[in-house]
Image (spheres, rainbow, N blue to C red):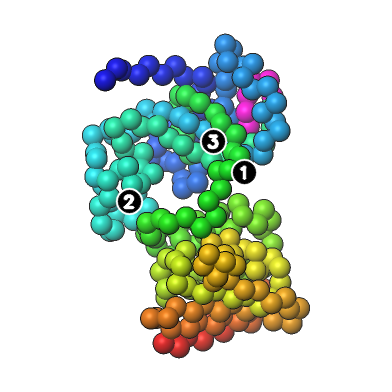
Amino acid sequence: MENICLNPVGRVVSSVKTAREMPAGGVPAVIEILPPYEAALLRIEENSHLWILSWFHQSDRSNLVTPPGVNRDLPEYGVFALRAASRPNPVAMSLTKLIKREGHRLFLEKLDAVDGTPVIDIKPYFENDIVFSPVTSYIPGKNREYRQNQMLRRAIAHHQEECLHLQLAVRMALVAEDIFGHLNRPDLIVSVRGSACLADTIQGLSRARLANPPRFSFVPSLTIQQTNWDLADKGTLTLTWLGPTAMLELEDEELLNIDFAN
């Protein structure tokens, strides 16, 4: 088979210099496009989000099987079944929000590539990229704080606003995950009684659809904020907000009335 030659189109400018220092989700960064490719940025500002394909040059390329980086206590996976940086060809695919363009420079909300990382391509995020309820491996984070932070990132990406009821939804989903595990499973029935923000965020986190299979329902309410989670072989969980605040650092029992029956 022929060798493939890739020419970088730009490089990452970041405050993080090594992969070990990179926090989950990345940090604000800039991509500087090389002069021969600047014309390729024409009208890129029409897109809010971009796929950044980069070459993780600091990665170990020898591992074909590894435990997930988010939780080294889990069983091993082949690297083609993970988003691990260690892989035969360390091509990274990162979804990021475009803040602005200034000439040949793209300012990004967050990127998980270290300073100096070669960028090999940029593609806009399109509507057709969405698979709302995919089948995926269940790879929980190493601890509850990590899982909460990851869930908060997904919630904001879906709901687009970090409001009070988004925070509440994250905590409710976290409690449900503690009991049921993977929230994106076709036999977990989810219902919400409360605000549209609560319902929208819970649906985004659980990936529950109204049909195919039907496992999500919503009843608007101004007087109660409640979610119900039902799994036939595990039990039923009802979570009711105690109010008046949904701060993420509160203990579950300070924030919610938790009623679980199996």
- Depth check: give the residue in front, 3 or 194: 3
Residue named by callout 2: 68
Residue named by callout 3: 51
**Which quadrant does the C terminus fall into?**
bottom left
Amino acid type of the residue that numbered disc 3 sits on in the rendered structure: Trp
Would you say 113 lies left or right of 37 here?
left
| Callout 2: SS | loop
- Depth check: give the residue in front, 82 or 117: 82
Residue 26 drawn at (x, y percent): 50, 42
Residue drawn at x 25%, y 52% as measured from the top left: 76
Residue 25 drawn at (x, y percent): 50, 46
- Residue range of the region highlighted in magenta in the rendering: 102-107
Q: CA distance from mark 2 to mark 1?
A: 29 Å
Label 1 CA crowd tier, 10 Å (few <14, some 14–19, many 20+): few
| Chief SS of the magenta region | strand
Query: Can you see residue 65?
Result: yes
